[in-house]
Amino acid sequence: MKITILGSTGFVGKVLLKKALDKGYQVKTLVRNPEKLGEFKYRVEFIQGNIFNAEDIEKTVSETEAVISTVGPPQRNPGDPERYKKAMEDLVAILEKKNIRRLIHIGGAAHLGGEKENWTLGRRFLRFFLNTLSKPILVAKHLEWEVLKKSKLEWTLVRPPRIADGESKGKKLMADEKNLASLQVNVEDLSNFLLEQITSVTWIRKAPLVSNE
């Protein structure tokens, strides 16, 4: 199966890319600098460009069956949230045009967009912390979710809290639409969950909060 991974040179994307290739997926990806793919440069099909160019997006997703996106504003200089909303609008329109139904995207546990969610003290603190340091990121992720809700795609928005580096500690990953089990998730466990969504129907058109026990 050939899939698209967007954001493959980022913190989560690098782990996700390796796991996808290890599982036997053929991967296409969109990168500004192919050298950042490192050893994977010769194991993937890449398009050189950026997520804010609709033509680049279309070239990348063509002839693939599902898209996983880890794209999001960087913590340093996150930029205008509207750019990420427009990028999501372009991505959705292109996937609908090409009849590529499955889209898995990363949001966050601290941004708005859900209904009747349980905002615990810890989750409120996480939102306050991020809202103080990186408000444009929260706004961008909220806007992306609003675009997904209006689409006809079989989308899943995966919403992690703090993403921890390093190997998995073997703690169970919990997914729930209303509740966040903890304020941390391991990057390997998160990547495995993202890949599982390619064939799973459990979270279609839903936005699970994911974290380790």
Image (cartoon, grey):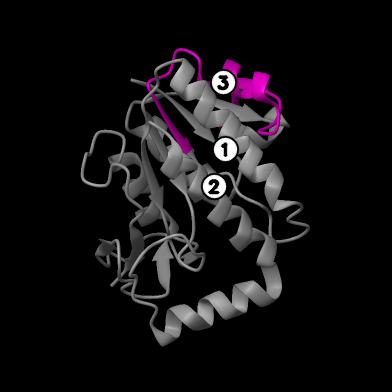
> Disc 3 marks which amino acid?
Thr
Q: Of callouts 2 and 1, which one flags the residue occurring earlier in the amino acid sequence?
A: 1
Residue that badge 3 annotates: 60
Label placed on residue 88 = 1
Q: CA distance from mark 1 to mark 3?
A: 14 Å
Q: Residue at x 43, y 18 (%)?
A: 64
Q: Within the image, what quadrant is residue 190 found in?
A: bottom left
| Secondary structure state at the residue bearing disc 1 | helix
Labels 2 and 1 touching (C-beta < 8 A):
yes
| Secondary structure state at the residue bearing disc 3 | helix
Q: CA distance from mark 3 to mark 2?
A: 20 Å
Q: Judge whether 17 appears above or below 47 on screen.
A: below
Q: Of callouts 3 and 2, which one flags the residue occurring earlier in the amino acid sequence?
A: 3
Q: Judge whether 113 appears above or below 145 on screen.
A: below
Q: Residue at x 63, y 73 (%)?
A: 131
Residue that badge 2 annotates: 144
The image position of residue 138, as x and y in percent, is 59, 62
Q: Which residues are magenta?
A: 39-68
Res. 136 in view: yes
